[in-house]
Amino acid sequence: MTARIYSAVARFSAIVLLCLGAGIAQAGDSDANAAASLRAKYDDLQDRLSRNQFHRPLYLDSSETPDSVTGDIYARVNYPFATVRAGLNNPGDWCDILILHINTKYCRASAGSPGAVLNVSIGRKYDEPLEKAYRVDFAYRVAAQSANYLQVRLNADAGPFSTRDYRIALEAIPLESGRTFIHFSYSFSYGLAGRLALEVYLATIGRSKVGFAVAGTGADGQPLHIGGIRGLVERNTMRYYLAIDAFLEAMSLPPQERLEKRLHEWFTAIERYPRQLHEMEQGEYLDMKRKEYLRQQSEVQSHRPDRRPAAAGRNQPAAYVS
């Protein structure tokens, strides 16, 4: 009887281990396929990474449907994959990245179900109280992590003025000579109300703003850059990517020196593209971000409950897009 019980337990254990092993193999295969696909993309983009308007190994693409818009950046960076993986797989570090963006007023990583949540406040490109900002809660997940592949996802169901389905994704693979290839994606969706609000902004305050894609040539022979919602998503995709790059650049410094390095690196980077990204002078940006970072750190250290309204400023679309 005892022998039969042990035999049954052994068979059951073997089945469980087999199933678990199959699951692990499938996950490994999936990561390997994703890494191989990203490597193939890197090989395909060699010419565009070498020669482009950005004067750095970077390729920007965007697309638009009737109810959504997406921006994608592919870039080769001079950081080892181990550095990229260590720097981008922690939710708190993503708050240090997101706060660099001019419209991010606050970010706090907290425990959620089933994982971490980034409580982000989005507001005007000026210093303002948090109660006037709009809160967006991003579910944070490290979707894949191995010696040769990293994938991180941030998803939010709702955003300012009837936008929804915010998706931020990053994947990375190691390259030769201690470099890394990164794919960063930023997208959101909108219904009729959201599209109308965006179009009002783009027809008024944002009417002179453009993206990076070239739509043609003007009478003066200069390139005409795309505008509209695609231009908007291209600008913000670039801002977020440059924030990631600034964060990685500062990782080699002592912790007490990293904030200033990130702030200066990010501002210097966006000023290389003034037609698309210039919004304020350096002194104004640095002063605003130092205050916001101190406020953010004070909130995190004190663990005070977040009492900010979940939908402040819903009717002020110009506050949240640049």
Image: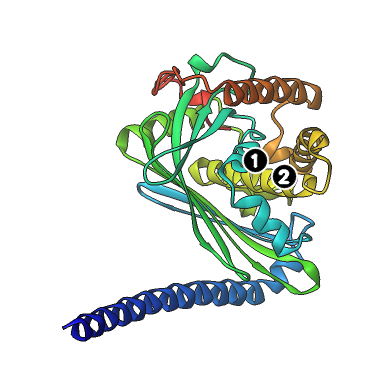
Decide which of 72, 277 is in the foreground and name it: 72
Q: Which residue occupies 51% across, 27% down?
A: 121
| The N terminus: image quadrant | bottom left
Q: Which residue occupies 52% across, 28% down?
A: 122
Residue at disc 2, secondary structure: helix
Q: Which residue occupies 24% across, 85% down?
A: 7
Q: Residues within 10 Å of mark 1 (few under 14, many from 20)?
A: many
Decide which of 134, 307 is in the foreground and name it: 307
Based on the displayed image, in which of its 4 quarters is residue 286 positioned? top right
| The C terminus: image quadrant | top right
Q: Position of residue 129 (x, y in %)?
A: 56, 13
Q: Position of residue 210 (x, y in %)?
A: 61, 41
Q: Which residue is mark 1?
A: 97
Q: Residues within 10 Å of mark 2 (few under 14, many from 20)?
A: many
Decide which of 306, 249 is in the foreground and name it: 306
- Above or below, 270 against 9 in this view is above
Q: Specify which label sits upstream in the sequence, 2 or 1.
A: 1
Which amino acid does the dot numbered 2 rest on? Phe
Q: Which residue occupies 66% across, 71% down?
A: 45
- How far is disc 2 from disc 1 in space, using C-alphas? 6 Å
Which amino acid does the dot numbered 1 rest on? Ile
Q: Position of residue 110 (x, y in %)?
A: 49, 35
Q: Which residue is mark 2?
A: 247
